[in-house]
Image: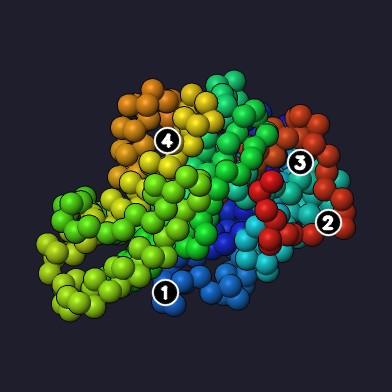
Amino acid sequence: MLLLAFETSCDETSVAVVRDGVVLSNIVASQVRLHAAYGGVVPELATREHLRNLAPVARRAMESAGVNAAAIEAVAATRGPGLPAALMAGYTAARAFASARGCPMLGIHHHEAHLYSPWVAGEPPRAEWDAFEPNVSLIVSGGHTLLVHVPAELRHRVLGGTIDDAAGECFDKVSKLLGLPYPGGPILDRLAEEGRADAFDFPRPLRNDPSDDFSFSGLKTSVRYFLEKRPGLADDPVALRDVCASVRAAIVDTLVAKTVRAARRMGVRCVTASGGVTCNLALRRGLEAACGEARLRLRLAPRALCTDNAAMVGLLAARKLGRGAVSDAPDLEADPGWALG
Ligand code: KG4
Ligand code: ZN
């Protein structure tokens, strides 16, 4: 089945073409530079940019896959959660395309798409559904931090999530306090590679709490007080790198410890991770070391599919359609507050 997928839940306009579990193309138009001037995503600007980019990005996705619009047999789009008008733009464009073609159209939950992205590997990326095994999955990005139990393919239960800031949001807010450009997560990660993780002791909220929930806003506040007491510290390149490494260690330590603990408790043999923060070098190394020690298999989403993309949406939609999912009702709308069941 040849499927065209759309993703517009936040600040990336992405369209992908997938066929039989293989990603033929995955075009991502990032709006990072547009929002950088404001230090965060401006919803109104994001929507305008999606509307401007949707048609050309879809055209490029089909050209790069070497397929004609007339050959598309199914359509998918992220239906929620996310920025309301941004979701509406992509979901409505997908619906228009599907109804013009007279083919099925399936709305996909954004987090569920992340949840299965660790089961994609290779070049071109291919879904490895045969390799699937029950797992505990960490989804970490700018907008979400979730621990999910996946006992069987296409079945899941949320174990916990953040009660305040998401992990990526914490990386970005701390970076801003340090005067780094937006989005700071990747820059802080790079600087941290040259710093000492034990230079400063930052709090690890809820690390030892029995729940599977996370909290990162207290860590951000403690960094703010720490910097207020030491004016000029962030201008010292060595101290800056030490702060980056120490903050990163606090976030990663908490994520890794709670993920492995949940996996042990749920009795699974496999841990997976996805979402933008899964690009973080210390998180990748930390999960590898902890899973190795706990004799858990680890599957990380491929780097290119960690941040938001339509390929993960398309692969999941194709699997669901193949398993009997039916087309969304014609009056169904995007759902910005859609909770992962
Ligand atoms: O999944 P994503 O593209 O968008 C959301 O759905 O939020 O994730 C973006 C987030 C941003 O907060 C960004 O700073 C963070 O992922 N991020 C990182 C790294 N790369 C991306 N955070 C820490 N270290 C990284 N290397
Ligand atoms: Zn995401």
Within 8 Å of ligand 2, the CB of disc 3?
Answer: no
Q: Residue 74 is drawn in which quadrant?
A: top right
Give the Cα distance between marks 1 and 3: 37 Å
Q: Which of pointers 3 and 4 indicates the residue nearer the eye?
A: 4
Where residue 243 appears, as percent x and y from the top left, is 21, 61
- SS at mark 1? loop
Give the Cα distance between marks 4 and 1: 33 Å
Q: Which of pointers 3 and 2 indicates the residue nearer the eye?
A: 2
Q: Are marks 2 and 1 in contact (CB under 8 Å)?
A: no
Relative to 107, 303 lies left or right? left
Within 8 Å of ligand 1, the CB of disc 4?
Answer: no
Where residue 181 appears, as percent x and y from the top left, is 33, 69
* Residue denoted by label 4: 260
Q: Residues within 10 Å of mark 2 (few under 14, many from 20)?
A: few
* Residue denoted by label 1: 39
Q: Which of pointers 4 and 2 indicates the residue nearer the eye?
A: 4
Viewer-closest of 80 and 313: 80
Q: At label 4, which amino acid type do we have?
A: Val
Position of the N terminus by quadrant: top right
Q: At label 1, which amino acid type do we have?
A: Gly
At 58% from the left and 72% from the top, the residue drawn is 43
- Taking the image as drawn, is residue 124 in sight? no
Above or below, comparing residue 129 to residue 64 in the picture: above
Above or below, comparing residue 322 to residue 203 in the picture: above
* Residue denoted by label 3: 74
* Residue denoted by label 2: 332
Q: At label 2, which amino acid type do we have?
A: Leu
Within 8 Å of ligand 2, the CB of disc 2?
Answer: no
- Taking the image as drawn, is residue 47 in sight? yes
At 62% from the left and 29% from the top, the residue drawn is 151
Q: Residues within 10 Å of mark 1 (few under 14, many from 20)?
A: some
